[in-house]
Amino acid sequence: MPVPSRPAVPATAAWRAGDPVGRRQFADLGPFALESGGRLPAVRLAYETWGTLNEDGTNAVLVLHALTGDSHVIGDADEAHPTPGWWSSMVGPGAPIDTDEWFVVAPNVLGGCQGSTGPASPAPDGRPWGSRFPLLTVRDQVAAEVRLADLLGVDTWALVIGASMGGLRVLEWAASEPHRVEAFAAIATAAQTSGDQIAGFHTQLAAIAADPRFRDGDYYDAADGDGPHVGLGLARQIAHQTYRSAYELDERFGRIPQGGEDPLEGGRFAVQSYLDHHGDKITRRFDANTYVTLTRSMITHDLGRDRGGVEAALASITARGLVIAVDSDRLFPPAQSERIAAGVPGAGPVRTVHSDYGHDGFLIEEDQVGRHVSEFLNESVRVR
Ligand SMILES: CC(=O)SCCNC(=O)CCNC(=O)[C@H](O)C(C)(C)COP(=O)(O)OP(=O)(O)OC[C@H]1O[C@@H](n2cnc3c(N)ncnc32)[C@H](O)[C@@H]1OP(=O)(O)O
Ligand SMILES: N[C@@H](CCO)C(=O)O
């Protein structure tokens, strides 16, 4: 049986930078000097807020998304273009982070493609930055979020919370702005990306670079309008395997052929079809250059850079900390959480989420993660 052909989807088909979606707002934050020595002449962050900042400013919570997330933490049913929120189980009225109590802010990361300044944004000459977009570090991303906090009148966050790539920024906030972070929750994340992580990220970058439609990042004005969807999809497939555990892929899919296909005649196993699906899906909602920019920021992430090393940086954190690991996570293995918890004086022991799913457990095991966050808020982060 022949392998079914899949439709080619331009990587730029479904989203447009700066396109307002629902309740999203934009903050213009001016020029930025970057850690690498580069410069962005104008930075804009897209963000959403829920709840109300109290008079003392003591109830602010910053939620930081992972690699392909955005500001849309809570879904909106009545939008013109409804989109589900990626953490509606965690944030909302009556949720662990209860928006009747907390003022919640969620920005789209600097370098992102959901309204914040990124490689698809116009450079000073009016054309998209593309290959000219400067190297961004996690510190640059947090520096932009600091300016957003200034603009919103938030002096101190009661809690800064995030998982995976969001957790990298959580730790950077706690280390670089100790007087502005009362407590943090770092979930399935690391103080420094490891050789294994850098290797995995490298192959994802190579997959995008190898797509002739990538054109070194200058594909926005391509005459055929076609983006590097093949490379981006392949990068997502490589990544997605690390988001799930070997146990799950084997138990769930094993060697079952995809319906109607025969692997001995060129067809796929179900797990191949599953990865194809996730690879295709990302190209409908994400920009390849942003994927490259954010992946590079994860590669360079090192909380200890210019701070005397990771342990010294962790020891300098004054905030109370909640550290959560997923026991089956092969992307951010629990040892990286142990290192954070051991190093931060105000962090308790690692809270373990038991999951068969792997790294994506931070999204899937909402009851367990929610319970840990609720407990931490109740015990350590009450509104003063
Ligand atoms: C911060 C942020 O988190 S970013 C925003 C949220 N994250 C993402 O979107 C990342 C990508 N998605 C995921 O990682 C996961 O889907 C999660 C974590 C969101 C949800 O996990 P799960 O509920 O376990 O979903 P699962 O991994 O099984 O994927 C389900 C999809 O696979 C499809 N699928 C399942 N089996 C097959 C198969 N054999 N062939 C093809 N497709 C398949 C399902 O139809 C479903 O498609 P849909 O998502 O288009 O409806
Ligand atoms: N599913 C998550 C995985 C990375 O943490 C994302 O796409 O952002």
Image (spheres, rainbow, N blue to C red):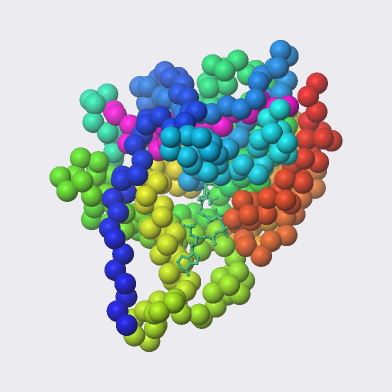
216 up-or-down from 177: above or below: below
Q: Say if the magenta span includes residue 110.
A: yes
Taking depth in this image into account, of 348 and 56 the one nearest to the observer is 56
151 up-or-down from 367: above or below: above
239 up-or-down from 180: above or below: below
Q: Residue furthest right?
A: 379
285 up-or-down from 378: above or below: below
In x, y percent, where is residue 90? 67, 41
In x, y percent, where is residue 255? 51, 81
Query: For residue 126, what is the image quadrant?
Result: top left
In x, y percent, where is residue 37? 40, 29
Taking depth in this image into account, of 144 and 368 the one nearest to the observer is 368
Q: Say if the magenta span includes residue 365.
A: no
Q: In the image, what residue occupies the spot 60% across and 65% down?
A: 245
Horizontal side of residue 125 vs 245, given as left or right: left
Q: In the image, what residue occupies the spot 47% across and 24% down?
A: 25
In x, y percent, where is residue 189? 62, 48
Q: Residue furthest bottom?
A: 264
Horizontal side of residue 45 vs 343, given as left or right: left
Q: In the image, what residue occupies the spot 32% across and 49% down?
A: 11
Residue 245 visible from this viewpoint: yes
In the rendered view of the protein, which quadrant contains the N terminus?
A: bottom left
Residue 204 visible from this viewpoint: no
Q: Main secondary structure of the magenta part?
A: loop
Q: In the image, what residue occupies the spot 40% across and 29% down?
A: 20
In the rendered view of the protein, which quadrant contains the C terminus?
A: top right
Taking depth in this image into account, of 80 and 343 the one nearest to the observer is 80
* Span shown in magenta: 101-123
Query: For residue 92, what is the image quadrant?
Result: top right
